[in-house]
Amino acid sequence: MRIDILTVVPELLESPLSHSIVGRAVKKGLAEIHIHNIRKYGIGPRLTVDDYSYGGDAGMVMMVEPVYKMIEELKAEREYDEIIYMSPDGELLNQGIANELSLKGNLILLCGHYKGIDHRIREHLVTREISVGDYVVSGGEIPAALLADAIIRLIPGALTDETSALSDSFQDDLLSPPIYTRPAEFNGWKVPDVLLSGNPKLIRAWQDEQALERTKRLRPNLLKSQK
């Protein structure tokens, strides 16, 4: 898999995508992440990438030409399955979307900044818009890093135990059950006896029960969405 991320602040993406599971997946050759500075195609001697909006609204808008040229340069080199704009207007990211995108080959993630991007890019080049929540942050860089992480950890070989991702929260529209590790007792707090029983059938039944109970209590909306 190859992910190209387009941004005017590449420094924001370097650390989150260089370490832990994502960093190891890149080192193993399971994924490629390329961060591109849109200022490469900035206008004039100052490489300007933003301007005032027509209509007089407050805030600066990323210009159409630098973004267009950057996307066209990449598209001339390879085909992309999706050109994704990280936007609070987009479809809300969930595990199903991450699962779907993890099966793709080449993705472009476009990070807005300032007030956003010229809408003509969204109309003519972007194929999908994804939001990480109903709130606004300073730019699309952190949401893009989050999306890349959610996708890459699902690639076979990215996790030491590939079955681990299957028990994550939201994979089956349920929250994950409680998890514990050694010691079995600490400060008077005990691990449930069933997890120490060594009986896989009982453990699985307990985990299923706990997952359903936690979902009913903490995220009942997930259960409603199944109906």
Image: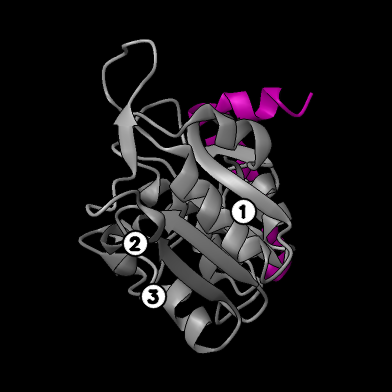
In-image side of 106 versus 111 (left or right): right
Residue drawn where x is 33% and y is 74% of the image: 183
Give how far apart the Cα atoms at labels 3 and 2 are: 14 Å
Q: Which residue extends farthest front?
A: 44
Asked which secondary structure carries label 3, the reply is helix
Compare marks 2 and 1 and give the one earlier in the sequence: 2
Figure quadrant of the C terminus: top right
Q: Residues within 10 Å of mark 1 (few under 14, many from 20)?
A: some
Name the image quarter holding residue 173.
top right
- Cα–Cα gap, marks 2 and 1: 36 Å
Instruction: Give the extent of the magenta segment.
Output: 199-227
In the rendered image of this protein, does residue 59 appear above or below residue 104? above
Q: Is residue 48 above or below residue 104?
A: above
Which residue does the image show at 37% across and 70% down from the upper left?
Answer: 184
**Is residue 215 covered in magenta?**
yes
The N terminus - image quarter: bottom right
Front residue (pair 140, 214) = 140
In the rendering, which numbered label is found on residue 13? 2
Q: Residue at x 38, y 27 (%)?
A: 135
Give the percent coordinates (x, y) of residue 178: 48, 53
**Which residue does the numbered mark 1 point to in the structure image?**
207
Three-letter residue code for mark 2: Leu
Q: Amino acid at mark 3?
A: Ser
